[in-house]
Image: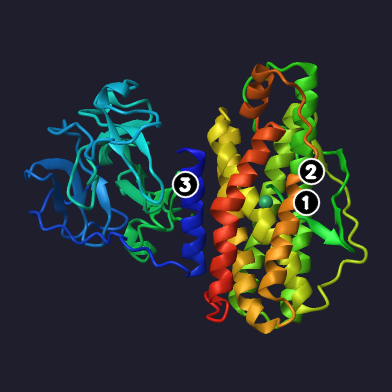
C-alpha cells in the first residue's frame, strides 16, 4: 500500500472509531444459499465450534470454490480447487502516472492486471490473480473468485498458514477473514484457534471496516484499524528514564536479522531504538497522568478503560523497543527509574485538552503514521511485527485523544475552535522543526538504516507533512464540526 492510501485507510479507521463517518458500503455477508456441503470438518475430530448448515461458496457460474460458509458466518476452505477464472476483476486503468497503465505492465507474477482502484484519490495499481496455490508466493494460497462473501474481486493470492481444513487441528477450520478501508478489501487466512476473539465478520458487528482478520500473532481478531511514545510531560518538559544495564525489559531477543552493519550504523540504530524505547516507557507514565486528569474532570468510563488499555499497550511497546535496542547494542538494556516528581493532573479541562491535542491528537496520530510506514519498510519479520503492533495500538491511542477532545470541547468554553487549531499547528511546527539526525547522505546507508527501522529526517518530515494534510487536518475539522454532538462518549 502506498503512503497516501495507507493514511487514507488510517483516516477511515479513525473516523470510524470516532463515530464521525458511517461507512457507506460495508458489505454484510449473508448466509449462503448453496446446497449443503461436507459439514466443514477437516480432520477426524469434532469441531470445537460446529459448522451448522454449511453452504458451498460458488463462483458466478455456480462452480465450487472449495470454500464453505457456516450459518454463523465462518467461511473456511474445505478443499483446494483450480480456479476457472484466474484473472482479477476490475476496471481497466485510464489514468497516467501510476505503477502501471496496461495489464502488460504487471509482470511480477502470473495473471497480472492494471486496475483502476480510485476511491478518495485517483489510483491505478497491479493486481495479480491465480489459478492454483502454486501461482502464489510462499505462505499464500490461491482463493478463487467467489460469491460476495469470498473474493468478489476475482481470484487472488491470500496469506495463509493453511491450505485447507486438513492442515489444521482436528477441531479447527482453515478460515478466511477480511477487512476493508473502503477503497480496498484485504484478506487473510489461517487455522482457527481457541485464542481467536472472532471467527467471522458477524463477530465484529458485521462491519467490514473493522473486519475479522488474523493478526501478527496469527489469531483472528476484530480490527481496530497507531511515534513511538506519547510524551510524559511535567511542567512543560518531556521526561524519560535513563537507560541502564539489565534484562528486565530488554532481553536479547528477537534478533532483527544478520547485523551486517558498520560501527556507525550500529551505534545510530542503538541510539535510535533506545530513544524510541525511552519514549514508549515514558508513555506509561503519561497515560497514568492522563488518567488522573480524566478523573479530575469527570470523564466517562469508556475513556478511562481505553486509557487503561493504552497504558498496558505502552508497556509492551517499551518492552519490545528495549529488546530490539539491546540486540543492536549487543547487551541487555532496560530503563532506569523515571523521575515522576511534580507529576499531577492538568488543573483545568482546557489544559487537559490542550495537552491531549499535542500529545495524542498530533503526537500519537503521527506515531501511528510513522509506525505503519515503518512496518512496510523494514525487512526483518521481528521488526515488522513490532512496528505493525505499535501502528495498530497508536492509532487506537490517537483515536482516544480525538475522542477525549470531542467529549471535552463542549465542556471547556475556554478552548475555542481557534485555540484548538492553533494548538494543533503549534504541535505540528514543534515536531516538524525538530532537527534531523541523518547519519549519512549516502542513499545506500539510508536504505539500510530504513530497513532496520530508522527513517531519514527528510523522509520522516515529508511523511508527517502529508499526515498533517490527510489525517490531522480532517480530524480537527470533523471534531470541531461535531463537537456539540459529542460522539463516542
Ligand atoms: Fe506506544
Ligand atoms: Fe501510544
Mark 2 or 3: in front is: 2
User: In the rendered image, is residue 281 in sight?
Assistant: yes
Q: Quadrant of residue 84?
A: top left
Label 3 element class:
loop
Q: Residues within 10 Å of mark 3 (few under 14, many from 20)?
A: some
| Some atom of ligand 2 lies within 8 Å of the CB belonging to the residue at label 1 | no
Q: Quadrant of residue 285?
A: bottom right
* Residue positioned 64% across, 71% down in the render: 405
Residue at far right of view: 341
Colour mode of the rendering? rainbow
Q: How many marks?
A: 3
Helix, strand, or loop for circle 2? loop
- Label 2–label 1 contact, CB within 8 A: yes
Which of discs 1 and 3 lies nearer the camera? The answer is 1
Kindly identify which numbered label has been placed on residue 215: 3
For this rendering, which residue is in front, 174 or 438? 438
Please name the residue shown 61% across and 27% down the image: 451
> Which residue in the structure is indicated by mark 1?
430
In percent of width and height, residue 134 lies at 27, 23
Q: Residue at x 66, y 77 (%)?
A: 408
In this picture, residue 226 sits left or right of residue 329: left
Residue drawn at x 92%, y 66% is 342
Using a 10 Å C-alpha cutoff, classify the residue at mark 2 as few (fewer than 14 neighbours), some (14 to 19) or many (20 or more): few
x%, y% of residue 108? 35, 21
Label 1 secondary element: helix
Name the residue beneath numbered marker 2.
434
Point out the image quarter for the N terminus.
top left
Q: CA distance from mark 2 to mark 1?
A: 6 Å
Amino acid at each position: 500500500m502506498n503512503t497516501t492510501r495507507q493514511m487514507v485507510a488510517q483516516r477511515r479507521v479513525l473516523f470510524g472509531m470516532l463515530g464521525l463517518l458511517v461507512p457507506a458500503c460495508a458489505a454484510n455477508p449473508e448466509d449462503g444459499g448453496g446446497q449443503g456441503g461436507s459439514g466443514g470438518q477437516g480432520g477426524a475430530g469434532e469441531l470445537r465450534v460446529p459448522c451448522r448448515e454449511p453452504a458451498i461458496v460458488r463462483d458466478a457460474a455456480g462452480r465450487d470454490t472449495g470454500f464453505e460458509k457456516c450459518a454463523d458466518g465462518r467461511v473456511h476452505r474445505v478443499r483446494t480447487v483450480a480456479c476457472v477464472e484466474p484473472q482479477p476483476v476490475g476496471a481497466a486503468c485510464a489514468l497516467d502516472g501510476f505503477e502501471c497503465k496496461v495489464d502488460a505492465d504487471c509482470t511480477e507474477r502470473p495473471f497480472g492486471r492494471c486496475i483502476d482502484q480510485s476511491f478518495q484519490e485517483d489510483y491505478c495499481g497491479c493486481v495479480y490473480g491465480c489459478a492454483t496455490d502454486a501461482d502464489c508466493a510462499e505462505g499464500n494460497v490461491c482463493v478463487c473468485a467467489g460469491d460476495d462473501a469470498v473474493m468478489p474481486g476475482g481470484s487472488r493470492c491470500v496469506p495463509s498458514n493453511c491450505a485447507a481444513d486438513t492442515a489444521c487441528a482436528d477441531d479447527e477450520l482453515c478460515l478466511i477473514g477480511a477487512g476493508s478501508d473502503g477503497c480496498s478489501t484485504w484478506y487473510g487466512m489461517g487455522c482457527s484457534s481457541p485464542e481467536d476473539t472472532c471467527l467471522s465478520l458477524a463477530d465484529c458487528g458485521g462491519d467490514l471496516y473493522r473486519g475479522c482478520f488474523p493478526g501478527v500473532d496469527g489469531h483472528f481478531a476484530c480490527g481496530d484499524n497507531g511515534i513511538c511514545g506519547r510524551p510524559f510531560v511535567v511542567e512543560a518538559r518531556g521526561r524519560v528514564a535513563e537507560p541502564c544495564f539489565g534484562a528486565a525489559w530488554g532481553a536479547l531477543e528477537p534478533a532483527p536479522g544478520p547485523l551486517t552493519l558498520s560501527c556507525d550504523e550500529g551505534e545510530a540504530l542503538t541510539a535510535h531504538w533506545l530513544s524510541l524505547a525511552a519514549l514508549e516507557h515514558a508513555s506509561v507514565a503519561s497515560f497514568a497522568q492522563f488518567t488522573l486528569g480524566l478523573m479530575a474532570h469527570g470523564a466517562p468510563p469508556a475513556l478511562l478503560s481505553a486509557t487503561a488499555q493504552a497504558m498496558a499497550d505502552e508497556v509492551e511497546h517499551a518492552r519490545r523497543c528495549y529488546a530490539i535496542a539491546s540486540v543492536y547494542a549487543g547487551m541487555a538494556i532496560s530503563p532506569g527509574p523515571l523521575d515522576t516528581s511534580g507529576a499531577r493532573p492538568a488543573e483545568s479541562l482546557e489544559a487537559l485538552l490542550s495537552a491531549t491535542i499535542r500529545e495524542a491528537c498530533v503526537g500519537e496520530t503521527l506515531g501511528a503514521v510513522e509506525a505503519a510506514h515503518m512496518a512496510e519498510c523494514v525487512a526483518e519479520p521481528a521488526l515488522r511485527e513490532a512496528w505493525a503492533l505499535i501502528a495498530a495500538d497508536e492509532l487506537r491511542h490517537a483515536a482516544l485523544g480525538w475522542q477525549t477532545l470531542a467529549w471535552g470541547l463542549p465542556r471547556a468554553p475556554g478552548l475555542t475552535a481557534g485555540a484548538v487549531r492553533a494548538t494543533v499547528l503549534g504541535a505540528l511546527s514543534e515536531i516538524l522543526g525538530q532537527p534531523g539526525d541523518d547519519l549519512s547522505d549516502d542513499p545506500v546507508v539510508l536504505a539500510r538504516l530504513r530497513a532496520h527501522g530508522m527513517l531519514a529526517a527528510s523522509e520522516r518530515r515529508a511523511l508527517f507533512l502529508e499526515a498533517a494534510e490527510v489525517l490531522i487536518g480532517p480530524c480537527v475539522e470533523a471534531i470541531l464540526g461535531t463537537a456539540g454532538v459529542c460522539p463516542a462518549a
